[in-house]
Image (cartoon, rainbow, N blue to C red):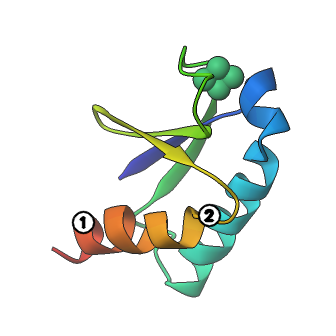
Amino acid sequence: MIIVICIGSSCHLKGAQRVVEKLQMLVIENQLENKVILNGSFCMGNCTKGVCVQIGEMIYSVSPESVETFFQNEVLHAVQR
Ligand code: FES
């Protein structure tokens, strides 16, 4: 699974760096280093929401506060399937 996190300026202001750091931590905690790849991207054209995170075709709006819930729902469930 490839997770792309927007690191454009608007998302940066909304905490993209913290989202990336938390995702890195969660991937390691869950020993998913071989299954999940984190990538950065410039602006995805969705600046009005939270930090843009893309998995496949889906674009999610994540914040440093909601990133753990996002990980549980969208990442853990998918890789454990
Ligand atoms: S800066 Fe992230 S979507 Fe525009």
Q: Residue at x 80, y 48 (%)?
A: 17
Dividing the image into four quarters, tell me where ligand 1 lies: top right
Q: Residues within 10 Å of mark 2 (few under 14, many from 20)?
A: many
Label 2 sits on residue: 23
| Any part of residue 1 in sight | yes
The quadrant in which the C terminus is found is bottom left
Taking depth in this image into account, of 46 and 17 the one nearest to the observer is 46
> Residue 39, position in %: x, y?
58, 40
Taking depth in this image into account, of 6 and 15 the one nearest to the observer is 15
Kindly identify the amino acid type of the residue bearing the numbered disc 2: Leu
> Residue 8, position in %: x, y?
73, 23
| Any part of residue 42 in sight | no
The label shown at residue 63 is none
In this rendering, position of residue 13 left or right of residue 35: right
In this rendering, position of residue 77 left or right of residue 50: left
Q: Residue at x 35, y 74 (%)?
A: 76
Kindly identify the amino acid type of the residue bearing the numbered disc 1: Ala
Label 1 sits on residue: 78
> Residue 63, position in %: x, y?
64, 53
Q: Is there a contact, CB below 8 Å, between mark 1 and mark 2? A: no
The correct choice, above or below, for 55 with respect to 25 in the image is: above
Q: Residue furthest front?
A: 48
The correct choice, above or below, for 15 with respect to 70 in the image is: above
Q: Secondary structure at mark 2?
A: helix
Q: Residue at x 30, y 37 (%)?
A: 56
Q: Residue at x 84, y 35 (%)?
A: 13
- Rendered image quadrant of residue 11: top right
- Rendered image quadrant of residue 24: bottom right
> Residue 64, position in %: x, y?
70, 60
